[in-house]
Image (tube, grey):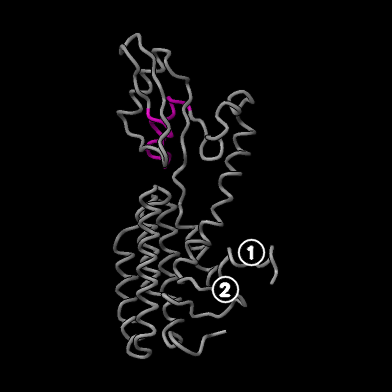
Amino acid sequence: MIQTGMFSETGMFSVVVGSLILLYACYSDLKSRSVANEVWLLMIAVGIPIALYNVYLSGITFLIRFGFSLFFTFLLAYLFFYLNLFGGADAKALIGIAILIPINPLNASLIVDPLPFAITTLFNAAIISLIVPPSMFFYNLRHLRSKRLSENLNLAFIGYTMRIDALAEATHKHVRALHVYEEDGDAVEGDVKRKFVFGGLDLDDDMVEQLKTYRAQGKIDEEVWVTPELPYMLFITAGFFIALFYGNLILLILTALVPL
């Protein structure tokens, strides 16, 4: 059902533009784990004149909702980026959505969603991404020995092990090291301690060579823990379409669990 009030005249055009841009961004993210800034500049360039037109049509009411959407989406996107929960392209995508589609132009859900459309998109994406930790755990359950799994149970939900001699190739395969390795004492006789790094570390040639040296000295195992760089744009795009046609997944789940 199309809303008859605010944003209805430009809403469908914004949805088409946003959908095409996000689908292209998914392709780029899958291919290289990056999306060019020009993609988001295009989304913003289309969104700003549409926003100005809607301010002209609806006045201060639309302007307040637009400002609310942009402000809180920016805060959440920056927080997720700062915590390494997703990359810069994902943050820019949400800001672009907040500008292009501040209000859901489709009234597909029977549940009133008080959140800006971009924030609903983010929350939907977060809900969908919850499938990753159990999937990772079952992968490790199948491939790791029970002792090593039990010793690294917390890591089994966010990563997997990889042989050090395969890491040189992995530097180009979108994985990150889950630990930084530091020498404790003498460089030759001393031990090497590992320290967990939230969000992981970029693998580079120097780090791989250092790990190979530690392994040759017998200071670390032949495998280390890594975490994949997920193409989070897929989750954002899925969250975008779910927000359009079904609404806020969190509200839908809560309503199903606690019916009014």
Q: Which amino acid does label 1 sit on?
A: Leu
x and y, in percent, of residue 18 in the image: 42, 71
Looking at the rendered image, the quarter that the N terminus falls into is bottom right
Seen at 55% across and 57% down, the residue is 127
Q: In this view, does 250 lie to the left or right of 91?
A: right
The mark closer to the camera, 1 or 2, is: 1
Magenta residue check for 214: no
Q: Which amino acid does label 2 sit on?
A: Phe
Magenta residue check for 174: yes
Q: Which one is in front, 47 or 116?
A: 116
Number of other residues with Cα within 10 Å of mark 1, as a class: few under 14, some 14 to 19, many 20 or more: few
Seen at 36% across and 66% down, the residue is 95
**Disc 2 element:** helix
Q: State the mark number for residue 245.
A: 2
Looking at the rendered image, the quarter that the C terminus falls into is bottom right
Q: In this rendering, is residue 189 above or below 252? A: above
Q: State the mark number for residue 254.
A: 1
Q: Are marks 1 and 2 in contact (CB under 8 Å)?
A: no
Q: Quadrant of residue 180?
A: top left
x and y, in percent, of residue 216 in the image: 40, 14
Q: In which quarter of the image is residue 197?
A: top left
User: What's drawn in magenta, residue-wise?
Assistant: 163-180
Number of other residues with Cα within 10 Å of mark 2, as a class: few under 14, some 14 to 19, many 20 or more: some
- State the separation of the CA atoms marked 1 and 2: 18 Å
Total tally of numbered discs in the picture: 2
Q: In this view, does 186 lie to the left or right of 98?
A: left
Q: In which quarter of the image is residue 198?
A: top left
